[in-house]
Image: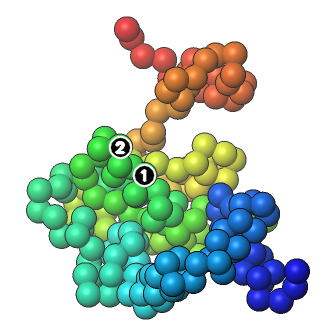
Amino acid sequence: MTGPIDELEKALARLPGFGRRSAARAALALVREPARLADPLAEALRAARERVRCCSRCGAFTTVDRDPCGTCTDATRDGSAVCVVEEPADIVSIEASGAFRGRYHALGGKLSPAHRMGPERLRIAELVDRVVREGFSEVLLALSTDMEGDATAGYVAEMLRGTGAKVTRLAFGLPADSGVAYSDPLTLRRAVANRIPQ
């Protein structure tokens, strides 16, 4: 098979969660039922491309007609704390947990020399400005626990020194419904270091 179906498979395979086989199945389903599957998908992709943007204040996903986003303009949210994440998708995950009711700030990535991602390419200056301007008393760093995430957290904490805000980080530990035998050494070290009284 060559041509448009191969190109469709390749495009789908670049999406997170799609392997080669699942991309091939999806491509064939789209081609087999264009009116039921392909046409609505094409329209939804077009609308998302034209209307979805990142909030000018926090960096979360929003629409062109709602900037700042609903989270930034929600007066019922806790205005004393801001949760810093790497990407807008992380905000969606934290919101789904229901564990945080403050404001958000997406950096747009993390420090990574290998990917030529330096501090100037992240929204760190905007964060410092917001902390001062909006008067946050706590900045919760909800960043990855890999080496780049740790470096980013350290850099952000240093940049926030002198703002008066307390900088905190997500607790490290074992995932829910997981056992000690299935955890890697770094996760276990962090779980022991951050143990809590029972």
Residue positioned most to the right: 1
Looking at numbered disc 1 in the image, what kind of residue is underneath it? Ser
Residue shown at 45% from the left, 65% from the top: 88
Q: How far apart are the alpha carbons under marks 2 and 1? A: 7 Å
Q: Position of residue 107 (x, y in %)?
A: 49, 66
Q: Quadrant of residue 27?
A: bottom right
Residue of label 1:
93
Image check: 20 left or right of 28?
A: right
Q: Position of residue 115 (x, y in %)?
A: 74, 69
In front of the other: 30 or 6: 30
Question: Relative to 59, does residue 154 appear above or below in the rendering?
Answer: above
Q: Quadrant of residue 3?
A: bottom right
Q: Is residue 162 visible?
A: no
Looking at numbered disc 2 in the image, what kind of residue is underneath it? Ser
In front of the other: 138 or 76: 76
Residue shown at 40% from the left, 42% from the top: 168
Image check: 174 left or right of 76?
A: right
Image check: 148 left or right of 82?
A: right
Q: Which mark is residue 97?
A: 2
Number of marks in the rendered image: 2
Q: Are marks 2 and 1 in contact (CB under 8 Å)?
A: yes
Q: Position of residue 39 (x, y in %)?
A: 51, 86
Name the colour scheme: rainbow
Instruction: Identify the image quadrant of the C terminus.
Output: top left
**Pointer 1: residues within 10 angstroms few (<14), some, or many (20+)?**
few
Q: Position of residue 14 (x, y in %)?
A: 71, 71
Image check: 80 left or right of 126?
A: left
Q: Is residue 125 visible?
A: yes
Residue shown at 52% from the left, 50% from the top: 143
